[in-house]
């Protein structure tokens, strides 16, 4: 299994959001969060994950 490092820079999260939105269009359960909302969610999740 390949271990992926944590995202560090804000631009990394922005790029990740672009990938997620491109790969999973319409998979947000009818919700359409903005890219900014997704970025904030991903940053929050990473910063608060159980180690």
Image (cartoon, grey):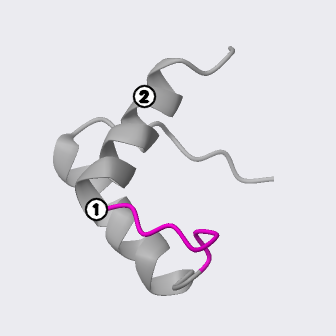
Q: Is residue 5 above or below residue 27?
A: above
Measure the alpha-carbon separation of dots 1 and 2.
14 Å
> Residue 7 or 48: which is nearer the viewer?
48
- Which image quarter: residue 30? bottom right
- Residue that mark 2 sits on: 44
N-term mark: 1 or 2: 1
Point 28% across, 62% down: residue:
35
Q: Check disc 2: other Cα within 10 Å, few if <14, some if 14-19, many if 20+.
A: few
Horizontal and vertical percent position of residue 24: 57, 80
Q: Tell me the SS state at disc 1.
A: helix
Q: Main secondary structure of the magenta part?
A: loop
Residue at 18 percent of width and 52 percent of height: 11
Q: Is the Cβ of the residue at disc 1 closer than 8 Å to that at disc 2?
A: no
Looking at the image, can residue 19 be seen? yes
Instruction: Provide residue 9's location: percent of width, then percent of height.
Output: 21, 40
In this image, 41 relative to 14: left or right?
right
Give the residue displayed 43% in from the left and 84% down from the top: 22
Say whether residue 25 is left or right of residue 38: right
- Nearest the viewer among 44 and 19 is 44
Q: Nearer the viewer, residue 28 or 4?
A: 28
Residue 30 is inside the magenta segment: yes
Residue 7: tell me if it is visible.
no
Q: Label 1: few (<14), some or many (≥20) within 10 Å?
A: some
* Residue 34: percent from left, percent from top: 29, 62
Range of magenta residues? 27-34
Q: Position of residue 1 (x, y in %)?
A: 81, 53
Work out whether 27 lies above or below 49. Answer: below
Question: In which quadrant of the rendered view does residue 51 lie?
Answer: top right
For disc 1, the marked residue is: 35
Q: Is residue 16 above or below residue 21?
A: above
| Disc 2, SS | helix
């Amino acid at each position: 299994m390949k271990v992926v490092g944590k995202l560090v820079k804000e631009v990394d999260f922005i790029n990740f959001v672009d990938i997620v939105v491109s790969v999973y269009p319409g998979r947000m359960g009818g919700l359409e969060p903005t890219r900014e909302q997704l970025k904030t969610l991903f940053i929050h999740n990473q910063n608060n994950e159980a180690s």
